Image (cartoon, rainbow, N blue to C red):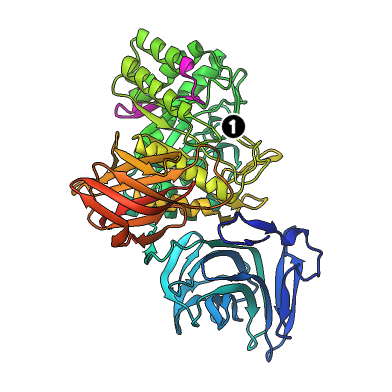
Amino acid sequence: MSVIAASPASADVSGDFDTAALGSTPSGWTVSGGGGDATVQQVPGTVDRSLRLRDTSTTASVLAGTAFGSTSSTVVAGFRLRAAQTSATIGVHLDGNAGHSVTVAMSADGRLYTYDGTRRVDLGTYTADRWYDIRVVARPSTATADIYIDGERKADGLAFRTSGTALGRIEAGVSKAHTGTAWVDDVRTTVENNTGNWPYLGAVAPRTAQQVGTSDLIIGAETLDRDYTNYRAFAPYLGRLGATTTRLQGGWGKTEKTKGVYDWDWLDRIVDDARGRGVKPWLQLSYGNAAYPGGGGSGLGGQLPSSAEALDAWDAWVTAMVKRYKNRGVTEWEIWNEPNLAGIPVADYTDFFIRTATLIRAEQPSAVIYGQEAGIDVPYAKDFLARLAEKGKADLLDGFTYHPYNANPDDAWTYGQVEKLRGLIAQYAPGAVLRQGENGAPSWPGSFGALGDLDWTELSQTKWVLRRVLNDLGRDISTSVFSISDLHYPGKINSKGLLQTNTDKTIRYAKPSYYAVQNVASLFDRTVRPLPGYGWSASPDASLTVQAFAKQGAGRQIVGVWSGAAKPSEVNTTRATDLTFTDGNFDDPVLVDVRTGAVHDIPAANWSVQGGKYTFKDIPVYDSPVLIADRSVIKF
């Protein structure tokens, strides 16, 4: 699939190789070099169509390229690259008027590489007949570039190979010295507006979950119990994202397909691998099991087990589950999924929660146990909490989770209901915490699941996720992004994943939302705490959201600001805004665009301070979060 942005700050404009005629040159592409051909072909062993470059000459190259319009703004280019051998040199270039400015290539000796100026930079080995997900962020304003491979930043601040102040073309090629075949797919270029003449300092440095350590950011990895996603496929991206907890569904029906026989292998591998990547599993005890009459529903909206035999089997499985995984570092549990949306009477859910939580506590006294509901159903939550307290079992509840889905991630009603939930928890189960347990936005229109009836792109998905996450973190709510990978329900796809998938659930590429959440994970670990009641004002007096945080220790601040009171737009038009913070704490403030990761110095002429009152002039604000942050708390 090929995606080219037509202009700065526009949403992606798509066109794909899958609809191009076999044997044709893709529309908008030109072929040169004379050493072979470049045509749309079906990738061996798949039904996928990609651009194939085939060089049959050792004296001439084959090149295929397309122009995206000359620009001096930052260009973000994503593409997938695959070599049919390790004995030819193939590559993709971002070109300016002077030639190749940025190159990512595969050499004839089996190495991935790029350039820092004229110096070759090794990026590791590559394997034939394997797709590599590559992202290049190129900045003509500083003549530098960053390179990501499979979601991991491999190099940053690389000098352009050739001088020039603009880019305008992307080109793939097989070198003339070798014969060989290359495949290129999912070419996506977008253009990002520069922040005036403010000095560019660098990009937020991604941190793995192991490097982050602890945070309140959770990444959903749901539906593995029903094989709607592929853990092995997305596992390499999991730790690189930086979220330190992942939500998993335990899968009674998958584990006990034959009565009394448990096959833990599938879940053992997931739990052990996630922990090895620094990501702590949060296990949900659900769904039912068709092996038992009255065993309950086996998926979304499923009913609770009801027969005596099924309930006895549930008890045995829960006990065995906790016993097994408490020794594998699992301390957090959640009981069932969205009982209110399944129409489960609150009295039945309360009894089931008590039954299950009692078993967990007996096996793991220190366990952290969550009850839940979907949406924000305050009456259901109140009834559940009140019944729990009446039965003298409120001590079994350590937390309560909710799943809000609103087109506007800043929705005032949503957070008003959240405060009601907090009040109910304080009343009936003091000491328990509130957690946002599942939430996300699709990345294309017509997606299955919540919010799927609206028009979405990868851009609006990214903005939505960032606004929701920073709203939650700013209110001291641990928050989960749903989900790491697109989910393949029977006959339909839920596109809320941060990773685009193929039809076989393998990973196609990391969406822009993946890199944006990676920035959040790097910036907001548990040493960065929210500042409730933060004082601010703005001019012009637009519809703004402000969430403030401080780094523990010195207390230097990070303040997130964005506009919008509705679903995020498909444009990135900024508005110069003056901001005043009445109790700020900055020594050397910088501006961070969370979506892109770009860090810019705020010139001295654009900020001033009197006591604790900080005033910032002409801050470029739009409907995605930007941060005014002290330079000391930003890793770049």
Q: Which of 362 and 18 is in front in this view?
A: 18
For the N terminus, the quadrant is bottom right
Q: Give the range drawn in magenta.
A: 362-380
Residue identified by numbered label 1? 257
Residue at x 60%, y 28% (from the top left corner): 298
418 to 134, vertically: above or below:
above
Left or right: 467, with 389 as reference point:
right
- At label 1, the amino acid type is Lys
> In this rendering, does residue 492 appear at all?
yes
Q: Nearer the viewer, residue 409 or 447?
A: 409
Q: Which of 249 and 531 is in front in this view?
A: 531
The x and y percentages for residue 322 are: 40, 31
119 to 528, vertically: above or below:
below
The x and y percentages for residue 308 are: 54, 13
- The reply to whether the magenta stretch includes residue 369 is yes
Residue furthest to the top = 390
The x and y percentages for residue 464 are: 51, 43
Q: Quick one: label 1, few (<14), some, or many (20+) residues within 10 Å? A: some
The x and y percentages for residue 488 are: 64, 42
